[in-house]
């Protein structure tokens, strides 16, 4: 029924809203952490898709390299893991 679908949609959108709040909190925590070697920000205005970067550790073959990542958060986050992919090729 239409009413049942509307109930499901509002439940899904409220779940998405709570995930959005969680992601906003995590973004603030990351920004306040002061860790210069790690960054991540939402891609455009989509809070569920982020672009991140990790700097290679000093004293390793990865020093002076920056690795870009794509992160996609599911509507079930944090109970369902995000999909994280290296955009920059990683040689090892």
Image (spheres, grey):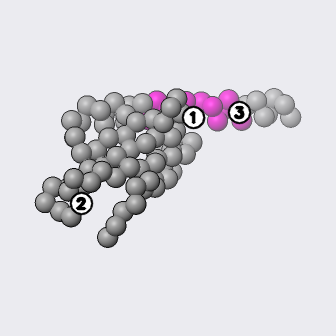
Query: From which residue to which does the magenta span run?
Result: 8-23
Does the magenta run of residues contain 4? no
Does the magenta run of residues contain 19? yes
- Which is the main secondary structure of the residues drawn in magenta? helix
11 relative to 46 in the view: left or right: right
Residue 60 in the image: above or below residue 74: below
Look at mark 2 in the image and give the residue it sits on. 62
The total number of labels drawn is 3
Q: Marks 3 and 1, Cα distance to the nearest angstrom? A: 10 Å
Residue 51 in the image: above or below residue 58: above
Crowd class of label 2 (few under 14; some 14 to 19; many from 20; radius 10 Å): some
Q: Marks 2 and 3, Cα distance to the nearest angstrom? A: 46 Å
Where is residue 29, by image quadrant? top left
Which of marks 1 and 2 precedes in the sequence?
1
Q: Marks 2 and 1, Cα distance to the nearest angstrom? A: 37 Å
Crowd class of label 3 (few under 14; some 14 to 19; many from 20; radius 10 Å): few
Look at mark 1 in the image and give the residue it sits on. 16
Where is residue 51, by image quadrant? top left
Indicate which label's residue lies in the foreground, 2 or 3.
Answer: 2
**Which quarter of the rendered picture does the C terminus lie within?**
bottom left
**Which quarter of the rendered picture does the N terminus lie within?**
top right
Look at mark 3 in the image and give the residue it sits on. 9
Residue 59 in the image: above or below residue 66: below
> Quick one: SS at disc 3?
helix
- Residue pictured at 15% horizontal, 55% vertical: 58
């Amino acid at each position: 029924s239409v009413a049942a679908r509307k109930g499901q949609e509002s439940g899904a959108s409220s779940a998405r809203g709570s995930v959005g709040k969680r992601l906003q909190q995590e973004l603030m925590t990351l920004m306040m952490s002061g860790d210069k070697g790690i960054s991540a920000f939402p891609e455009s205005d989509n809070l569920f898709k982020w672009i991140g970067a990790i700097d290679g550790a000093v004293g390793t073959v990865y020093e002076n390299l920056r690795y870009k990542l794509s992160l996609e958060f599911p509507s079930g986050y944090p109970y369902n893991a995000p999909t994280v992919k290296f955009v920059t090729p990683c040689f090892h």
